[in-house]
Image (cartoon, grey):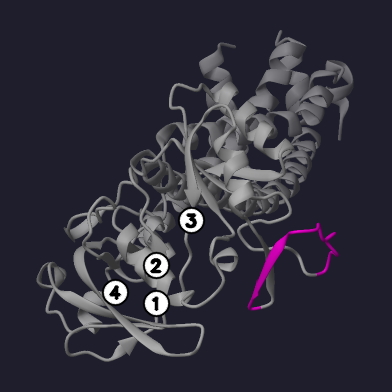
Amino acid sequence: MKLIDILQTANSNMFRSRLRTFLTIIAIFIGAFTLTLTNGIGAGVASYIDEQLGNIGAKDMLIIQPKNSNPFGESTSTPQKYEEGQSVTNTGGISMTLLNQNDLDKIRSTPGIVSADFDISVAPNYISGPNSDKFKFTASSYYDGVNISLKAGSIPNNHTDEKQILLTSDFPTVLGFESPEKAIGQNVSVGIKTPTGEQKVVYAKVVGVQEKTLMSMGGLQLNSPLISELHTLQTEGLPADATNKQPIITARFDQSLNDKQLEQLKKTLNEKGYNAITIEDQIGIIKQVIDAVIAVLNFFAGIALLAASFGIVNTLLMAVQERTKEIGLMKAMGMSSRKVFLLFSTEAMLLGFWGSLIGSLAGVTVGLVANKVATDTFLKDLVGFELTSFPLLSIFVIMFIIMMIAFLAGTLPARRASKKDPIEALRYE
């Protein structure tokens, strides 16, 4: 019996008991469907993050904080030892250690660091247009070299005396501008309170409106003159020692450093008492969280495939029992034990093939529909974000893995069939 004959025979044998075969394929379908859909979501999100990461720029920038701090502050549940001279700020229940001039000098003197300065944080009360209401907003500094996807205008300039602001896509309309383009060049009012509670207003020029992306999640971006002016008002009248402290220092490192040297630089800063991460590291954290969620979903898909493998074993064991006389006849006519094994193994792999094929096609179909709905609704402002992506190679890999699982599940029944004695098998009732 040739290989093509074995394939045709196995395929026809598989549908002798259609209900049993259908139920087994359904179990495989569930696992294949889940794997395809979850990996499609993972690939779509990863592709978007990689695109953002590739376009972000500022690859030579380090964001530095005290070792006992993190972007979300210290855990209030774990007591932290206080060191003499340390400054701590507490906002909204989050405690963060502040860096001072001594820290800045230590970082600047580290080999590999080209420049470093405080990342000045400000907390304005509101922003308003020429004829609009006042709106709350989050302010962040614009870093030189960071690339931003723009709807209109240009990025802020840190090397000018003009106070400039970059709006996110939600703000032009609420500030009274007809469109993002109409907002460019217009002045907006930024309100901030002094330590005495007096409300002060700073006027800033809108230079650009950015697309809604991962980079826009940090709020409105302000250039250095505007940040400096707001910080001066926010700390007006306070002692100089109190104003020259910040939770974050941004530094630029030598761009000629390779990955190994950069890791060594991070380690050196860590030994000095600081955590240092790049912008790539920050976005990588988001990717890790998404990968963890996908891994959990894949785990449940694995459970479905494990249940399906028991179904394959049961299906083929019953097939071996039902076709005992047939196996004896095939052996009596000269079919070798190896080919009998191959016949039943092929049947198992075909169960895996059909289940994975139908499951993958269903997963891709549902994923494409979900992607269409998402991009037309809650993801419509995130330009270039495809919720799902289905590389052909990943579909083939999923199908191959499932077929191998089916093959392994069919090994026991196939081996039992190949070991049948032809005479005893022909006598089987």
N-term mark: 4 or 1: 1
N-term mark: 4 or 2: 4
- Label 1, residues with CA under 10 Å away: few <14, some 14-19, many ≥20: some
> Which-is-in-front pick, marks 1 and 3?
3
Q: Is residue 78 magenta?
A: yes
Q: Amino acid at mark 1?
A: Phe
- The residue segment tinted magenta is 77-92
Q: Do the numbered discs 1 and 3 sit on residues whose CB atoms are within 8 Å?
A: no
Instruction: Find disc 3 in the rendering and name its residue.
Output: 119
Q: Do the numbered discs 2 and 1 sit on residues whose CB atoms are within 8 Å?
A: yes
Q: Do the numbered discs 4 and 1 sit on residues whose CB atoms are within 8 Å?
A: no
Query: Which residue corresponds to the image point at 30% horizontal and 67% vertical from the top-left?
Result: 168
The alpha-carbon separation of the residues under discs 4 and 2 comes to 10 Å
The alpha-carbon separation of the residues under discs 1 and 3 comes to 18 Å
Q: Amino acid at mark 3?
A: Asp
Q: Residue 44 has which mark?
A: none
N-term mark: 3 or 4: 3
The alpha-carbon separation of the residues under discs 2 and 1 comes to 7 Å
Q: Residue 137 has which mark?
A: 1
Q: Residue 170 has which mark?
A: 4
309 over 410 or under it: above or below: below
Instruction: Find disc 2 in the rendering and name its residue.
Output: 219
Front-most of 397 and 158?
158
- Residue 69, position in %: x, y? 69, 56
